[in-house]
Amino acid sequence: MSEARWYVVHTYSGYENKVKANIEKTIENRHLEEQILEVRVPMEDVSEIKNGVKKTTQKKLFPGYVLLNMIMNDDTWYVVRNTRGVTGFVGPGSKPVPLTVEEMTALGFNVEDKVLVDLEVGDQIVVIGGAWKDTTAVIQSINQQKQVISINVEMFGRETPVEISFAEVRKAE
């Protein structure tokens, strides 16, 4: 399995959020969660003064573009390329070119911050932050790419799988 990289997709202007929603729905329907990891429409906070009132709004950093963290193969290329509102990948011809780490860092994305953990499936962990703080559980699965582990927690009288960031857990003593 090759490494997931960040790619840029060109969309019709104003359709960025719709494209993001459509791709996320397709990922869910086709079970491509392990291949298309993240879909982002980069936003920035902008302060405006209208009628003497200062308002902070969010504006698209790159109108007409959506960023995708994905493993490029024929399936993922086809799914993204044939999403309504997508005009194509950014790159020469029809060959998508991944963004470099330097380009992602310049955009404000922290891509080098990968956490290495000495956890394995079946290990007992304690959640040290977030909504499940102080919960003790057994690791069901580990996703290095997304930097999360899956555990089962009891909700409403039944076991429910929950994904928790590596940074929010520690091995139980």
Image (spheres, helix red, strand yellow):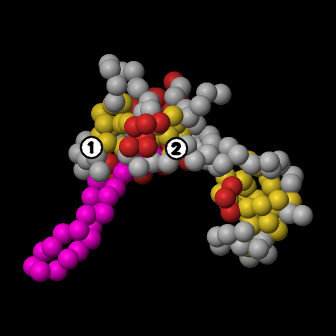
Task: Give the number of the disc on residue 102.
Answer: none
Of pointers 1 and 2, the one earlier in the residue sequence = 1
Image quarter of the N terminus? top right
Give x and y (percent) for residue 133. Answer: 71, 73
Q: Badge 1 is on which residue?
A: 64
Q: 12 and 56: which one is in front?
A: 56
For the residues labelled 1 and 2, the Cα–Cα distance comes to 23 Å
- In this rendering, would 134 be left or right of 63? right
Q: Residues within 10 Å of mark 2 (few under 14, many from 20)?
A: few
Q: Please state the total of marks drawn on the protein image.
A: 2
Q: Residues within 10 Å of mark 1 (few under 14, many from 20)?
A: some
67 lies above or below 53: above
- In this rendering, would 102 be left or right of 156? left
Element under disc 2: loop
Q: Badge 2 is on which residue?
A: 111
Give x and y (percent) for residue 131. Answer: 65, 72
Q: Residue at x 38, y 43 (%)?
A: 106
Give x and y (percent) for residue 10. Answer: 31, 37
- In this rendering, would 101 be left or right of 10? right
Magenta-span inclusion, residue 50: yes
Q: Which residues are magenta?
A: 39-60
Give x and y (percent) for residue 172. Answer: 86, 63
* Number of the front mark, 1 or 2: 2
Q: Residue at x 68, y 43 (%)?
A: 144
- In this rendering, would 105 be left or right of 33? left
149 lies above or below 155: above
Q: Amino acid at mark 2?
A: Val
Q: Residue at x 56, y 34 (%)?
A: 4
For the residues labelled 1 and 2, say whether their Cβ atoms are less than 8 Å apart.
no
Residue 159 seen in the current view: no
Q: Main secondary structure of the magenta part?
A: strand
Magenta-span inclusion, residue 150: no
